Image (cartoon, helix red, strand yellow):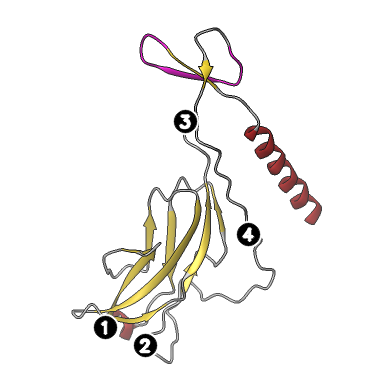
Amino acid sequence: MKKLTLICTLLIWLNVALAADKTIYKYTDEHGVTHYSETKLNDNYKEADLPKLSVVESVPSSSNTTSQSSAEEPMDTGNDTDIHLIAPQAGENIWGSGGDLTVAVAPLSEIQKQKYKIQFVLNNEKTTPDDQTSHTFKLVPRGEHQVQALLITRGQYAVAGQTSQITVYMHQASKK
């Protein structure tokens, strides 16, 4: 399994290295349609002025796994301000989600449901406090992102509890 992972990693890096050295040509026809090519098909094609390829280094997942709370059962908490992220995991590399990042916390206890709402935070941008235990952020760009969840007191909008802030890495294919 480790050999397969190593081979896949090497192939990805090889593709990135080859893509970085390619010249891309661009041509806009009489109908306003833009065409791109790796080869100069005719004199209409000019070298495209494209931004540099953004590459985000993957962070290896920790081999030390901790037990996670079940998503179906409420937390058995000694403190009613405890809140725990169940998704994504710290350091997680997220591939092929179409730019969607779903953040979830362990279900709240009945007491917590009566007293609090949940607010999700992505890169210091906060959602509106809500009763939902998950939220999907749309169109999250490639790169490194910080995620956190807050327990907000109903009516007072004060932070009663919070998860630790974690970092996740979004990897998405470029849209053409």
Q: Which residue is mark 2?
A: 80
Mark 1 Cα within 10 Å, few/some/many (few <14, many 20+)? Answer: some
- Residue 24 point in image, percent of width and height: 57, 24
Give the quarter of the image for residue 150: bottom left
The amino acid beneath tag 4 is Val
Determine whether the residue tagged by mark 2 lies in a helix, strand or loop. Answer: loop
Residue 1 visible in the shown view: no
Q: Say the numbered circle drawn on residue 18.
A: none
Label 1 is placed on what type of residue?
A: Lys
Q: Which mark is residue 59?
A: 4
Query: Are circles 4 and 1 on residues that touch, CB within 8 Å?
Result: no
| Mark 1 in CB contact with mark 2 (< 8 angstroms) | yes
Q: Percent x, y for residue 96?
A: 53, 46
Residues at marks 1 and 2, CA–CA distance in whole angstroms? 9 Å
* Marks 4 and 1, how far apart at CA: 38 Å
Question: With 17 as the anchor, is 136 left or right in this view?
Answer: left
The magenta segment is 29-40
C-alpha distance separating marks 3 and 2? 48 Å
Q: Amino acid at mark 2?
A: Asp
Amino acid under disc 3: Lys
Front in this rendered view, residue 80 or 148: 148
Q: What's the mark number on residue 115?
A: 1
Location of mark 3 (residue): 176
Magenta stretch encompasses residue 67 = no
> For the residues marked 2 and 4, what is the alpha-carbon distance in whole angstroms?
34 Å
Q: Residues within 10 Å of mark 3 (few under 14, many from 20)?
A: few
34 within the magenta span: yes
Q: Residues within 10 Å of mark 2 (few under 14, many from 20)?
A: some
Q: Is any atom of residue 9 visible in this view? A: yes
* Residue 118 sits above or below residue 12 on the image: below
